[in-house]
Image: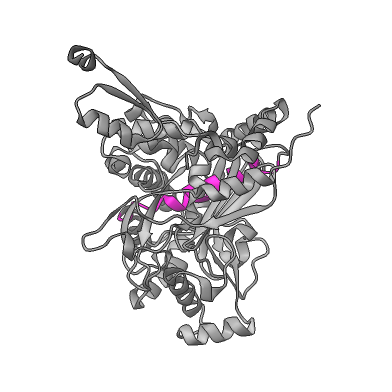
Amino acid sequence: MADITRRIHLVNVGLEGFFHEIREQGTPAVHVDWRPPASGDVALMRKIAALRGPAVEKANAETVARIKAGRPVWVDVQPAAEAIYGMERNVLLHSGPPIDFFDMCDPQQRAVEAAAIFEGWATDRAGLAARLKRGDIRLLPNYVLGSVGAMCGVISPSMPVVVTENVTRGNRSWTTFNEGKGAVIWMGAYNEETFRRLRWMRDVLAPGLRAALRATDEGIDIFPIIAEGVLMGDEVHARSAACTLLLLRRLTPLLLAADVGREAIREIVEFIGRNNHSFLSLTLTACKTVADAAHGLPGSTVVTAMSRNGVDFALRVGGMDAWFIAPTAPMDEAIYYSGYGPEDAAGDIGDSAIVETVGLGGMIIGAAPSISSFVGGSMRHSRRAMSAMRSVCAGENPAFAPGSVDFMPAPVGIDIRQVVRLGVSPIIDTGVLHKRSGVGQIGTGIARAPLEAFRKALAAMPLPQEN
């Protein structure tokens, strides 16, 4: 009897705790990570089955094709009020879905406050609150006007913005230049140095880069830089060091050819070069233009936007115009700076999850070995994470294929059917902000898009009219 027991090999399906108990007793075992489809929700399982027809597959294939065919080009630099269609002079834009100022997380409140002070509309939070209550200042989500913002994502009328055009479809998007680290409003912190930097960005950086872009008739193609940067260790969300240096290689001759003073060129090159997130602004606008151009195909179950404001997460699906909102994810899978932990963190925040929508960032986390610790610490873990993301996507994009994971093509086209069926949430590379105003960034890592938003979207998805 004892001999028979020693020869037993077990396959454990489902609950992982049983697997570990079996292994602890010295019995050979294999674990199968299985869970009931759609978490056992019969209505959602039936909805998934009803959405398995050729009309949906065709719409999804076209959505993915439009994403892959996009050619975003950085074409200009302008003040936000002049560049962003429909932006009025008393409007402040912010990341995430609509939210009242008094319901915002503290970092986003402080970012709005800083922008109002920069515009000369207020001198403190009390003055800002009074003007907001009177309607003198209005708040709008970036996505209402086609713009996009990292972290707190605040854009005010006089801030200079990157203007990016998807020349394949003719649509544009906009975002501010990245401020870097420290007391910066995108991280929900400010001091006097913040305003000095913002004025310099408006008065020196923006005119210099505008002149450089006008020194070429072509603008700067963004995706070829990303494709090269991915091979050099960037996943272009949490890490953009290579792309930033590649951008400088493209920009520097243009600055020298333009009517820009020597000192201004030195300051601009130094500012961009010392901030590895400088390229992030181009990534965000590029992905936004491509995702917007892919939106609007009836029957498509592919996600075309994800956005967060520290309180709520919003999701848009290609075949519907509605946004589906759920509480944003807690930051319990991040790596924290010394002295901080999840209990100190604000909720997941920023429009930058548009990057994952287009198959970058967390979808190709294996591109950046330096951040493999986000998903377990080794390239094996990174490859496994990319495989999990491929399981919930409608296609793949060989244009972004990290060499560090054997040139595995980027998963692209997050499919709400697969997310709900498998219970696998898309991972989003992100920074972590302290929940109290003024502290700023306290960590970095991944967040998981809340399944509740995907379940809501799937429940609302109209059934296709098959031909």
| Residue at (48, 48) in percent of width and height | 449
Residue sitting farthest toward the front: 1
For this view, does 2 lie left or right of residue 304? left
As displayed, is residue 212 above or below residue 425? below
Q: Is residue 231 visible?
A: no
Count of numbered badges drawn on the protein = 0
Q: Nearer the viewer, residue 335 or 210?
A: 335
For this view, does 69 lie left or right of residue 329? right
Q: Is residue 279 magenta?
A: yes
Q: Nearer the viewer, residue 77 or 100?
A: 100
Q: Position of residue 14 (x, y in %)?
A: 41, 32
Q: Nearer the viewer, residue 426 or 216?
A: 426
Q: Quadrant of the N terminus?
A: top left
| Residue at (37, 71) in percent of width and height | 189
| Residue at (57, 61) in percent of width and height | 97
Q: Quadrant of the C terminus?
A: top right
Q: Is residue 63 magenta?
A: no
As displayed, is residue 341 above or below residue 59? below
Q: Is residue 191 visible?
A: yes
Q: Which quadrant holds residue 148?
A: bottom right
Q: Position of residue 244 (x, y in %)?
A: 37, 47
Q: Position of residue 265 (x, y in %)?
A: 37, 58
| Residue at (55, 44) in percent of width and height | 73
Magenta span: predominant SS is helix
Residue sitting farthest toward the right: 467
Q: Which quadrant holds residue 299?
A: top right
Q: Nearer the viewer, residue 167 or 122?
A: 122
As displayed, is residue 54 above or below residue 356? above
Residue extent of the magenta highlight: 274-296
As displayed, is residue 158 above or below residue 270? below
Q: Position of residue 441 (x, y in %)?
A: 33, 62
